[in-house]
Amino acid sequence: MDRETPSLDFAVIGHQDSWPNIQSLINVMRTSELEELPISKIKGIYDYIPPRGIFKMHVKSPTGLETNGLYIDTFIAPDKLNAQNLRANIQKVKDAVKVAHNLNIKMTILGGFTSLLLEGNFKDFEGYDMVLTTGNSLTSAYVVKGIEKAALQNGMNMSKSNLLVIGATGDIGIACTNYLKGKVNRLLLCARNMRRLEVFGQSLLKEGHDVKYASDLTELAPEADLIISVASSSDIKMNALKQKVIICDAGYPKNLEEKVEHQPGVFLFHGGMGQLKHGYFFNPDYTSQFYRYPAPHLGHGCIIEIILMAFEGITENYSIGKGNITPVKIDLMYQLSLKHGIVLAPFYNSKGIMVPNKKVSAT
């Protein structure tokens, strides 16, 4: 994978969301003759692994189109996604983009934490001859379509429901709020940066929407019927919820289930995901080692967005710059998804596939 490969149409730049996933990845990349490494040893070497291509992707559309991509891991540790490590992480992302550039790949998506660079300072990547996106338009589409479908299936009237958005001033949080603001009874907005939250909340109030905002989640959660979480924080507290509530956990990593597992009225699903019905293949195929889901051919909305851009020949930057994702962009990307046989992922969480008011194990 270190030579020029013109047949690669797109690159996906990302990182793993947990040490168990990292352990599986590192050990499956090693030859079978070598002893399996424990997490303790992996943590000692992980920061020194440079970004590199891990596996290729091949995707088919019912239109007859096919496209090929490469997943490039930045090897950013999941417990170092913080301000103290920002400079080192940015350098890893830049190095990963160079890997894609050196392979003559013309389209790249920066996923997970790496997307923050495109939400903020795009100038770092202007010198590369490639189209870039965060993939946040399609991720937002799968989140809002998922919450609408869950409400319908669980008999909840959205127009009479209060929607809580956790991480409301992030790119996806803003996009989801703007998409749903006229479809719900009240908006409850939560974010850590009170200044940005107040600016966003006041703009929605001026539009005539019923809005309450706070940096303290405990002030908002008891009022929520629907919850969208797009925050990456691990210290979210989900106390005093209503007896019946729907939660779309679209954060990365997804970490809300243990906070609500003893509350029986909660319908919690992992959001922002799509299902590629007509073929989604990896080489090498790591789906049994660390890329595991309870249904076949599931993928993150951000990754699917770059796949759709490759199918459609979109040759301009798409989801870049915080706050630039409009309802029109969300609907357009969602329609392109359906055109290419990619649908909203079935409802699932860590326990398996879900049905309304009942959780069942994956088969």
Image (tube, rainbow, N blue to C red):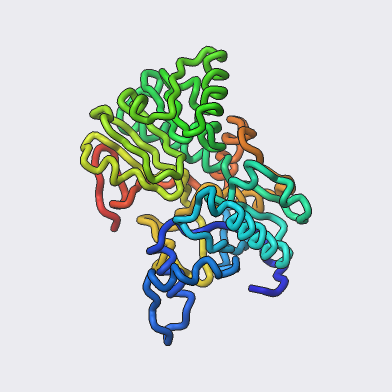
Residue found 26% across the figure and 29% down from its top: 240
Q: Nearer the viewer, residue 85 or 117?
A: 85
Q: Is residue 279 visible?
A: no
Q: Nearer the viewer, residue 69 or 265?
A: 265
Among the 4 quarters of the image, the one containing residue 153? top left
Residue lying furthest bottom? 33
Q: Is residue 233 visible?
A: yes
Task: Tell me residue 284's x, y (percent).
Answer: 51, 72
Residue 16 placement, left or right of 234:
right
Residue found 72% across the figure and 71% down from its top: 4
Identify the image quadrant of the N terminus: bottom right
Residue 69 placement, left or right of 19:
right
Among the 4 quarters of the image, the one containing residue 61? bottom right
Residue found 53% across the figure and 66% down from its top: 47
Q: Nearer the viewer, residue 154 or 213?
A: 213
Task: Tell me residue 279's x, y (percent).
Answer: 51, 59
Q: Is residue 197 above or below residue 79?
A: above
Q: Is residue 276 above or below residue 259?
A: below
Q: Nearer the viewer, residue 221 or 70?
A: 221
Task: Tell me residue 216's x, y (percent).
Answer: 39, 29
Residue found 58% across the figure and 56% down from its top: 89
Identify the image quadrant of the C terminus: bottom left
Disc tally is: 0
Residue lying furthest front? 84
